Image (cartoon, rainbow, N blue to C red):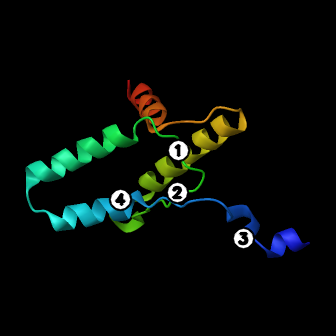
Amino acid sequence: MGLLNDFDNFFKDISIVDKAKEFDDMMESTMNRAEKLDFLLSSFDKDADELIPDVEKVRINYYEDGIDSFRLALRLKSIIAMSKFNGKEMTHNDILKIMLNGLG
């Protein structure tokens, strides 16, 4: 019964990544379009081979983007969870490949 009352056990020793805040800070600090594009491309390259963390903050802009962005976020999270359950850690490159294969 103690497990149901104390959710801190699930999240101890986990670092929470907030890429959206880092992105927003960079976009607000510069007005130069070339710098913004360079930041985007470098962040994709930097994070491409990193393992996806267990806990991520996911922004959902339902009123601007509609329900489809939420569905996509949940679909990606379920792919990551099933992959981890089957013993394979995923990187951002793996997710990008899955998304591109789905488009083609």
Q: Residue furthest bottom?
A: 5
Q: Label 4, on which residue?
A: 65
Image coordinates for residue 71, horizontal then vertical, percent: 50, 51
Q: Cα distance, mark 4 to mark 1?
A: 24 Å
Instruction: Please tell me which residue is depicted at 43% across the width and 28% down the height of the picture.
Output: 97
On the picture, is 4 further left or further right than 101?
right
Q: Which secondary structure lies at badge 2?
A: loop
Q: Which disc is residue 81 wearing?
A: none
At label 3, the amino acid type is: Asp
Image coordinates for residue 68, horizontal then vertical, percent: 44, 52
Q: Which disc is residue 8 wearing?
A: 3
Eye-nearest disc, 4 or 3? 3
| CA neighbours of label 4 inside 10 A, class few (<14), some (14 to 19), many (20+) | few
Image quadrant of residue 99?
top left
Instruction: Please tell me which residue is depicted at 52% across the width and 44% down the height of the picture.
Output: 52
Q: Which secondary structure lies at badge 1?
A: loop
